[in-house]
Amino acid sequence: MKILAIDTSCDETAAAVTEETAILSNVVWSQASAHAKFGGVMPSLAQRMHEERIDWVINKALKNAQCSMSDVQCLAVTAGPGLAIALEVGIRRAKELARELKIPLIPVNHVEGHVLSPLAFSRGIKGGGIVFPAIGLVVSGKHTDVILIKKIGDYEILAETMDDALGEALDKAARMLGLGYPGGAILEKMAKEGNPKMYPLPLPMARREEKNAFSYSGLKTAFFRLTESLNRASRQAGLSKEQIQDLAAVFQDRAFEHVVRISARIIQDLKDKEYKIKDLLVGGGVGANVELRNRLRKMANELDLKVHFPYSTRLYGDNAAMIGVAAGFNIQDLRFRIQDLNLIDREPRARIDKGFKREENK
């Protein structure tokens, strides 16, 4: 079954065509450069740019998949979580197409898309089997979640952020160093040349790991004070390139140590309770960071887990292919089929462990 998927959850306008776990096309139009001068996403601008580009990405996705709208048998759209007025653009267009084509429309949770993104593969390529229950780790600009995947469609959040998500914290650290927005990828580049032990920074949630939560506010504050003290010491000359590289490495080191340490403890606790966890699925934009992936591989090896990452870097950030793959799994479950399109609405604070509003629970 060919699925046309749409994602407008934040500042990427995306469309894709999928068939089961195969990705036939995956088109993403990034708005990052338009938002950069504001130092973050401007909601009204994001909405307007989605409206301007949504038909273009849909047509491009169909063309790249070498199919037409008449070949599409199902539609999928991100219904949440995300930026409300951005979500609205994708949902509205998906509803219009569903009515026009008289085909089903499946609302998909954006975080579930990230969790299942390692199960997506390109045309003609099949992935390895996953044993459930499994662990999902989502590391993105808005989410840092450890999720127990009992089976596809049945999730339990074991840990989540109390404040900033990992990706958001990296972007804010980059901004403090004058690296622009979004700065996570630039911070990674700088960190490769820096010394992660050059300056002292606190490890988040030290001696409070039992809370099963992530927090980056304290680390961010300590980093701000450190950069300010170094700026004052430079007598208005500003930070040198070497200092910026070292600071980037220090912040990244502490941030990654935090997420790996909390995740490892949670997984070990599950194993101690005789959960037969064999697989770890990692999704989200920060997963593209090579250093983080290396640390997660090391952790997985120590815990006797097989770790799974998306096969393509295009699947780490926001995209519609992961939404189509998630819909492909969910369409087999009657609970996810909604006949009344009026029941599908934006849910900006949707949780992966809670279903969307449906006819049976009105």
Image (cartoon, rainbow, N blue to C red):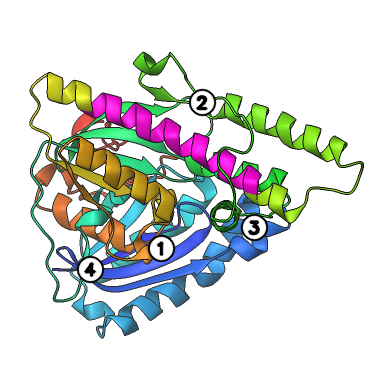
Identify the secondary structure beneath mark 4. strand
Q: CA distance from mark 4 to mark 1?
A: 18 Å
Along the horizontal axis of the image, is 22 left or right of 266? Answer: left
Q: CA distance from mark 4 to mark 3?
A: 29 Å
Check whether the beta carbons of the residues at disc 3 and disc 1 lie within 8 A of each other: no
Mark 4, residues whose alpha carbon is within 10 Å: few (<14), some, or many (≥20)? many
In this rendering, the label closer to the viewer, 3 or 1: 3
Residue 214 x, y percent position in the rendering? 44, 27
Q: Is residue 219 above or below residue 184?
A: above
Q: Quadrant of the C terminus?
A: top left
Counting labels gives 4
Quadrant of the image occupied by residue 69: bottom left
In this rendering, the label closer to the viewer, 4 or 3: 4
In this rendering, the label closer to the viewer, 4 or 1: 4
Please state which of residues 292 and 116 is positioned toward the viewer in this rendering. 292
Residue 93 numbered mark, or none: 1
What residue is rendered at 28% in x and 43% in y? 298
Residue 256 visible in image = yes
Residue with the mark numbered 3: 45
Q: Is residue 258 magenta?
A: yes
Residue with the mark numbered 4: 18
Please state which of residues 313 and 205 is positioned toward the viewer in this rendering. 205
Residue with the mark numbered 2: 203
Three-letter amino acid code at disc 1? Answer: Arg
